[in-house]
Amino acid sequence: MSKSPIIETHGLRKIYGMGDIQVNALDGVDLQINEGEFVAIMGTSGSGKSTLMNILGCLDRPSSGRYILDGEDVSDLNKAHLAVLRNRQIGFVFQSYNLLSRTSAMRNVMLPLLYQRSGKLSSSQREEKALAALKAVGLSDRAAHEPMELSGGQQQRVAIARALINDPVLILGDEPTGNLDTKTGDEILTLLHELHDRGRTIVIVTHEQEIAAQTERTIILRDGKIDVDKRNGARN
C-alpha cells in the first residue's frame, strides 16, 4: 500500500533582501517526503538547508511556491496559525536541547500540551502523557530531575519525549547529535531509528555524512536547489 506524502513542496522560493541586493536562499525546491520516511538534509553553509528546515517546521514562510504539510497547504498561513500548526503537527529536536533550566524533565515534556487551544487536558492527564513519553525514551525514572542533573544524552532524550508528546505527524531534528560525544550520539540515533521503526516520519539536518548515511534517504542542497536526492543502503 502506497504511503501518503507528509511533506510536499512545489517551486519553493525564499528571497532575502530588497531591490538589487537579493539572495535566493531557496530557488525552486520541489520535494516530497512520504509518511514513515527517515530523511537527512545536508549542504554547506549558505546552501539553503537551514532556510528549508525553517519553512518545513512552519517557523518561516516561503516567498513563493507551495508547502503542503500532511495534505494541508500552509504556504500562506499567518504567524498565529503557523504557531498552532507547529504545536499540533511537528515535534522539534534541537542541537542545544532547548529545555527550561530550572524545570523538571516532566514539566519540560509537558510544555507543548500547555499551548493547546482546544481539548484541554487536566493536570493529571498531562502528567500521564508526559510520563508515557519519557518512558518511550527510557527516562521515566528521571521525571523529577532538572536538566542540570542530566547528562547531555539524557537531556536530548527529554527533548525527544517533548517532541513526541502531541503525537506529531513529523519529527524535525536540527543537528540532534551535534552537541554529543560519539557514543551518546549513536545512542540518540538508535532511539530515532526505533521511533522510525514504529512508523514515525523523521527529517534531520546534519553536516555529518556518517549520520546521513544511516537514514533511508539523503537530500543535499547547493545554492538553494536540490543537488542530490539519493536512497541510502540498508541500515546495519
Image (tube, rainbow, N blue to C red):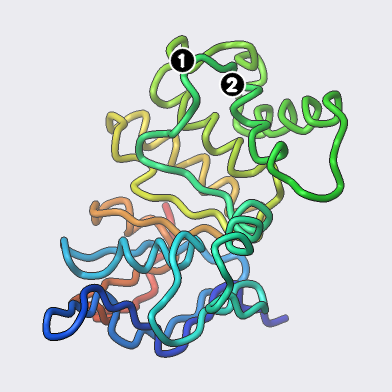
Q: Is residue 131 above or below residue 10?
A: above
The residue sitting at 73% across, 81% down in the picture is: 1
Q: Which mark is residue 150?
A: 1
Q: Is residue 178 above or below residue 198?
A: above
Q: Mark 2 or mark 1: which comes first in sequence?
A: 2
The residue sitting at 68% across, 28% down in the picture is: 135
Q: Amino acid at mark 1?
A: Leu
Q: Secondary structure at mark 2?
A: helix
Q: Nearer the viewer, residue 198 or 236?
A: 198
Is residue 218 toward the left or the right of residue 76 in the image? Answer: left
Is residue 184 toward the left or the right of residue 84 in the image? Answer: left
Q: Amino acid at mark 2?
A: Ala
Label 2 sits on residue: 105
Q: Secondary structure at mark 1?
A: loop
Query: Whole-percent x and y of residue 25?
Result: 25, 74
Q: Is residue 225 above or below residue 216?
A: below
Q: CA distance from mark 2 to mark 1?
A: 9 Å
- Disc 2 vs disc 1: Cβ atoms closer than 8 Å? yes
Tell me which corner region of the image, top left, top right, bottom left or bottom right, holds residue 88: bottom right
Front: mark 2 or 1: 2
Q: Nearer the viewer, residue 162 or 86?
A: 86
The residue sitting at 29% across, 33% down in the picture is: 179
Query: Whole-percent x and y of residue 101?
Result: 46, 19
